[in-house]
Image: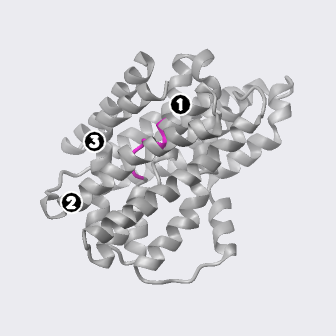
Amino acid sequence: MSDVVGILIQIFLLVGLGLLVRWRNILPRDQAVMIFNQAVINLTLPATVFLGLMNIKQFSWQLVKIPIIAVLVISASGIAAAYIAHRLRLRRATAGAVVITSMCGSTGFFGTPIFGALAKSDPQEYGQMVGMASLYSEIGTLIPLLTIVTIVASAYGEKKEFTVKQILIGLFRSLPFIALVLGFLFWPETHGGQFPQALRGTLGFLSSATVMLTMLSLGMTITIRDFSQYLRSVLSVNLVKLVFAPLVAIFLAAIFGLDSQARFVVVFESALPAVVIAIAYANQYKLDVELASTAVFTTFVFSLVTLPIFAYLSM
């Protein structure tokens, strides 16, 4: 538990450093955030995902259950958020923003880097968890994000048609997902002593930059907002995403009989803040963008409290 808290403290200090960089105008914000995000998506996160699979000693049914639980948690969260939005009698655009921001967590930009940092601090204890976190993120979260969340956003907002072809294009434009596929394909070589050590080392250098770039970018993006007009909606998103979702994950982990490592991964990943891409979805489908943006960023703030609690409960 002390390892997890220690890593979380370091990560949120990096977010604070990003805020300082923005406040002091040390780097041009828009250009720096764009460059950092592109570097993470196209270089460092794919390396982290690939190396994560290299740490998995053998594949088992435990690993198959992880993305299944992720999809169930996302679906349950969406249903709970829709019910709350209905009870609050929110207008349709606001209700849609509440639902989509409550569904998926920031497993790629936040979860996988955290597990990567944990694995670096204690490879014996956390090494295999990076691969598990990659499965949760790149299968259990990315696929629902491109399908279920898209359908929900379209239903609440400006209805747009989308096809299976568009979904597949979205998947295979995601370099972390491609890295996951390559990790499966080359898994025998990476565990048979045939994988080039120079390439492994290069991937390691790339992976080590993921946490720094991600958290600096997040800190430079955060803006302090007056969300009093959205108080009930924002609190609803935080309740569903940061409390309800991990509680569902704890229940499902017991039902599916996960071992201690897999249980820790699914509960921790389920407790992560809302995914930032929900803001882009809100804009694309003419939902309440201001509410979506406020809800996403407040989940990062409140997760300072909830993440350590659920990390402790999942151990």
In percent of width and height, residue 33 lies at 38, 50
- Are there few (<14), some (14-19), or many (20+) residues within 10 Å of tag 2? some
Q: How is the image coloured?
A: one colour
Query: What residue would you read off at disc 1?
Result: 264
> Is residue 202 shown in magenta?
no
Amino acid type for the residue under numbered disc 1: Phe
Amino acid type for the residue under numbered disc 2: Arg
Snapshot quadrant of residue 52 = top right
Amino acid type for the residue under numbered disc 3: Phe
The residues tagged by marks 2 and 1 sit, at their Cα atoms, a distance apart of 30 Å
Are circles 3 and 1 on residues that touch, CB within 8 Å? Answer: no
Q: Earlier in the sequence, mark 2 or mark 1?
A: 2
Q: Secondary structure at mark 1?
A: helix
The residues tagged by marks 3 and 1 sit, at their Cα atoms, a distance apart of 20 Å
In percent of width and height, residue 236 lies at 28, 56
Q: Which mark is residue 232?
A: 2
Q: Is residue 72 left or right of residue 96?
A: right
Residues shaded magenta: 268-274
Along the line of sight, the residue nearer the viewer: 71 or 11: 71
Image quadrant containing the N terminus: top left
Q: Is residue 280 left or right of residue 257?
A: left
In percent of width and height, residue 26 lies at 26, 41
